[in-house]
Image (tube, rainbow, N blue to C red):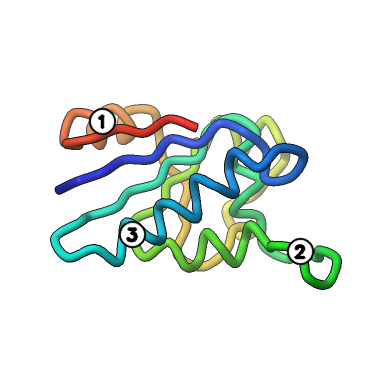
Amino acid sequence: MNTLFILNDAPYGTERSYNALRLARALGKVDGEQIRVFLIGDAVHCAKSGQKVPEGYYNAGDMVRMVGGEVGLCGTCMDARGIGDDQVVDGARPSTLKELAEWTAAADKVLVF
């Protein structure tokens, strides 16, 4: 089963992206599941490297690294927010709307957060 997660919200302020990343990681551990995560809009901040959060608080960058599947970031959204290719965590990469369309067409399930 091929599941695509599309995240729109910033990593902090609401828990929507946090919960999506938790679910993506958990689902990725199920046999036969292939996970892809696409970060668009303010969600591109989830993959920003160098995040420093209070002790005991989740770190969205660490969560992105632990997804266990492909993670693409909207390149246009990164540019609009001043995030360079060298500022994203390992395992995440700039992507395009064209690739998101391809991932969507190939997915058995699409979950939007």
The image quadrant that residue 44 belongs to is top right
Height in image: 93 above or below 90? Answer: above
User: Which mark sits nearer the N-terminus, 2 or 1?
Assistant: 2
In this view of the protein, which residue sits in the foreground, 63 or 42? 63
Q: Position of residue 93 (x, y in %)?
A: 46, 53
Kind of residue at disc 2: Tyr
Kind of residue at disc 3: Gly
Height in image: 60 above or below 37? Answer: below
Residue at figure coordinates x 38%, y 60% from the top left: 26
Q: Position of residue 33 (x, y in %)?
A: 20, 56
* Circle 3 residues within 10 Å: few <14, some 14–19, many ≥20: some
Contact (Cβ within 8 Å) of mark 2 with mark 3: no
Residue at figure coordinates x 40%, y 46% from the top left: 37
SS at badge 3: loop
SS at badge 2: loop
In this view of the protein, which residue sits in the foreground, 109 or 73? 109
Q: CA distance from mark 2 to mark 1?
A: 32 Å
SS at badge 1: helix
Please give the residue where the numbered disc 1 appears in the rendered image.
104
User: Which mark sits nearer the N-terminus, 3 or 1?
Assistant: 3
Numbered disc in front, either 2 or 1: 2
The label number, if any, that marks residue 57 in the structure image: 2
